[in-house]
Image (cartoon, rainbow, N blue to C red):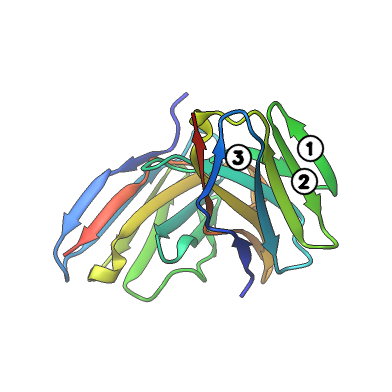
Amino acid sequence: DAGVIQSPRHEVTEMGQEVTLRCKLISGHNSLFWYRQTMMRGLELLIYFNNNVPIDDSGMPEDRFSAKMPNASFSTLKIQPSEPRDSAVYFCASSPRRGASDTQYFGPGTRLTVL
Amino acid sequence: QKEVEQNSGPLSVPEGAIASLNCTYSDRVSQSFFWYRQYSGKSPELIMSIYSNGDKEDGRFTAQLNKASQYVSLLIRDSQPSDSATYLCAVNTPQGGSEKLVFGKGTKLTVNP
């Protein structure tokens, strides 16, 4: 059974450009989480969806970040315009049930570099 | 801001020794606690979860929880070089009608052959 799939795995872009990260959940999972990981701040939750509905977006840094879940198995995280401080590894994770009390399965991550 | 604190290490132990990883958390209402392992350049993977006070054992791993002290630990017995990784403590924290996992910054463990 395929795990969480993320694309691209690496992205290098220039400041001001739009970046779109993609995530496909494990089949049958209901919750999706977007995280950002940096050395300074560790692993931070950006936004969490349950059954395609955003439940908690308090971690989204600012209006430049937006996330969508157009169907039950797919999500995008968009940064527009991108800035060098957005450079990080972005992980998507899925979980079988609502909430954060269940195991979260992480995708391989997207390493974003903004020059 | 709900916090999860870990000693960043690095923690270095010889092969075969017991590695002890510690974590404290600030929110008394937290109910679920997790240890994730993250190899360099890879994604986190769950190795242990614990929900009740006391010890929970799974093979060479033992998680310990003390809610009164707001403390959770992970013991790795008979440490192997393959256990060398960063260990992330995660705490399920209710916030504003929902709940979220708050991660510590991790402890880097090196097991020396």
Q: Which mark is residue B64?
A: 2
- Image x and y of residue A101, in percent: 68, 49
Q: Quadrant of the C terminus of chain A?
A: bottom left
Determine crowd level at label 1: few under 14, some 14-19, many 20+ residues with C-alpha closer than 10 A: some
- The residue positioned 41% from the left and 58% from the top of the image is A36
Q: Quadrant of residue B24?
A: bottom right
Residue drawn at x 62%, y 63% as measured from the top left: B5
Type of residue at label 3? Pro
Q: Is residue B25 above or below residue B54?
A: below
Could you tell me if residue B13 is visible in this image? Answer: yes
Q: Badge 1 is on which residue?
A: B56
B29, B88: nearer the viewer: B88
Mark 1, mark 3: which one is toward the viewer?
Answer: 1
Instruction: Give the quadrant of residue A74.
Output: top left
Query: In 3D space, how far apart are the residues under numbered discs 2 and 1 (Cα atoms)?
Result: 6 Å
Which of the chains bears the disc numbered 1?
B
In which chain is the residue bearing label 2?
A: B
CA distance for labels 3 and 2:
25 Å
Asked which secondary structure carries label 2, the reply is strand
Nearer to the camera, A48 or B59: B59
Residue drawn where x is 47% and y is 44% of the image: A72
> To which residue does mark 3 refer?
A96
- Mark 1 is on which residue type? Lys
Locate residue B32, reporting x and y percent.
73, 52
Above or below, comparing residue B83 to residue A45 in the picture: above
